[in-house]
Amino acid sequence: MSVTTIVITDPELLAKLAAASGQIIFRGPTGDTVKTAEVVANRDILAAYKCPYTHEQLDELSKNRTGRPIGDVLKDLKEKYGE
């Protein structure tokens, strides 16, 4: 995927973009859509996330794993679909 960097120097536009949530639609002067973009999750929100389990609970849960080892799953997928 290619990346295009556009530097925004207009303080009003920069403030609007910083405050945006969800999808952003960029329109030209005639109202035609030029581009759309999705807002990336704010790191502050991710940093504020608190896991609902304690470290002890996670340790206990990891002892009682069910299912197959990931290596076996990958092997089966490669056999079925190729590399």
Image: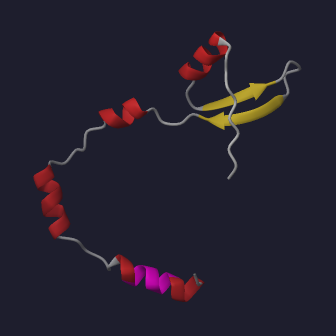
| Residue at far right of view | 30
Q: x%, y% of residue 8?
A: 67, 21
* Residue 32, picture quadrant: top right
- Is the magenta region chiefly helix, strand or loop? helix
Q: x%, y% of residue 53?
A: 19, 48
Q: Does residue 46 appear left or right of residue 5 in this picture? A: left
Tell me how many marks there are. Answer: 0
Residue at position x 17%, y 62% from top?
61
* Residue 82, picture quadrant: bottom right
Q: x%, y% of residue 52?
A: 22, 44
Residue at position x 57%, y 81% from top?
83
* Residue 57, picture quadrant: bottom left
Q: Is residue 80 magenta?
A: no
User: Is residue 3 shown above or below 9?
Assistant: below
Q: Does residue 58 appear left or right of residue 21 in this picture? A: left
Residue at position x 71%, y 35% from top?
36
Q: Is residue 76 magenta?
A: yes
Q: x%, y% of residue 44?
A: 38, 30
User: Is residue 60 shown above or below 21?
Assistant: below
Magenta range = 72-77
User: Is residue 65 shown above or below 78?
Assistant: above
| Residue at far bottom of view | 79
User: Is residue 82 shown above or below 61?
Assistant: below
Q: Does residue 54 appear left or right of residue 70 in this picture? A: left
Q: Does residue 42 appear left or right of residue 17 in this picture? A: left
